[in-house]
Image (tube, rainbow, N blue to C red):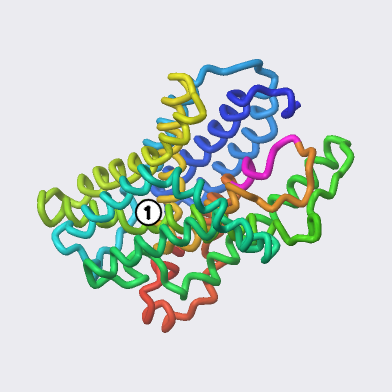
Amino acid sequence: MEGDSDLSVLLLRDRLVLLVLAIGVYAQYSRSKHKQLHVTFLLIYFLAIFCVAPFLLTLEKVSYYSLSIVSFFIVVLFIATSLRMSVNLKKRENKNGVTLVIVLIYLFAVQMFLGPVLDISKELLQEFTDSVHNIINKKMLVNLALFFIFWLIVRAQGKFSAKDIGFDLVHLPTAFRICLFSWVLVQFTILLDLFYANKEIFWTFSLLENGRIEWIGELMGYVFGASLFEEAVFRGFLFVQFLLVLEKNVKWNRQVSTLIALIISQLLFSAVHIPGWISSNFGQERFIFEIVDTMAMGMFFMVGYLRTQSLFVPIGMHALLNYGVPLFSGATYEATFYLSSYFIIVIYFLWPNFVNNHSDADCEASEAPECKFNN
């Protein structure tokens, strides 16, 4: 039973399934003309879900060093996949790396003073968040403030537009459909899981909790909070800016520059979480795993960004993985376990079904990636 399983066992199950998905995605980009490969990959995926995953739950405990190795291979596969994707650098502002340096200094300052700022904000914002029934919460307000400061820095230092870091509104409807479809699939799968296991189905979702619409505030807190800020900075800005600096100043070729930019930007994404791990008193094994695994999740969001050439899908992915708005409870697998799988399946194997409604004129006008990736 999942509730009796050690956290390390659950992580091993989740990461092995994600590793299978990463192999499938890399294989698709290596041999995209072989449509039968899609079917083979999906069969292997469902075999892992229904045969291998239940067996793993019988284990008592797993070394975090072993988990680190699995996450490392996920990183390698996602990097290899990203290197096969196109990166649109057309009209991207760089200004010789000045903006990049200032943003890095800003991130360092955020890590130094975020703790005290959060402590102060809890007292200052408590009355306001209570007055709006937590539909707007402290998490959202603090991270929105961080995002707007970042955006002011970017705008002040260069001719950046929202599109330069992946915010093109033409892609928003597609991102919404993908996230909604994946979320509905998860709820349906959990319902089937409960029915198949002959368990009592508990409806856990409530529009109102203690007279408040708290689930909206919780979800919006992640969408407009950490997800918006982290995706804009680490996927939309830092990766592209490191790539531009390496190509313009170091004069490396595109493949090498992309590789280095990917590693540096996603290592930084992992590094900003270190204060939280230190405060949690993780041991050495767990600490090393968290570094590698967070980088793996960064690469997971990165391939979503490169696949869609838009930040809206990674933001939705990031938010739902943090808070999946569950409808039912008691299933064998939690919502986040299914979400990561379905996002990859939808983005890499069902993608044309979500974007074929774009006309040729729309694609040509907006340089939308839908025209490039219908394979």
x and y, in percent, of residue 61 in the image:
61, 17
Instruction: State the quadrant of the C terminus.
Output: bottom left
194 shown above or below 219:
above
Question: Main SS of the magenta segment?
Answer: helix
Please state which of residues 302 and 325 is positioned toward the viewer in this rendering.
325
Where does residue 327 sit, x and y in percent of width and height?
77, 52
Q: Is residue 334 magenta?
A: yes
Residue 137 location, quadrant: bottom right
Residue at numbered disc 1: 235
The correct choice, above or below, for 276 with respect to 90 in the image is above
Residue 83 in sight in this render: yes
- Residue 283 position, x and y percent, is 47, 19
Q: Quadrant of the N terminus?
A: top right
Q: Residue at x 73, y 23 (%)?
A: 4
Instruction: Judge left or right: residue 165 versus residue 326.
Output: left
Q: Residue at x 69, y 40 (%)?
A: 334
The residue at 65%/35% (across/down) is 49
Residue 93 colored in magenta in the image:
no
Q: Residue at x 28, y 64 (%)?
A: 154
User: Label 1 sits on what residue type?
Assistant: Arg
Element assignment for label 1? helix
Location of residue 117 with respect to 216 vertically, above or below? above
Residue extent of the magenta highlight: 332-339
Of residue 197 and residue 38, the one placed in the foreground of this image is 197
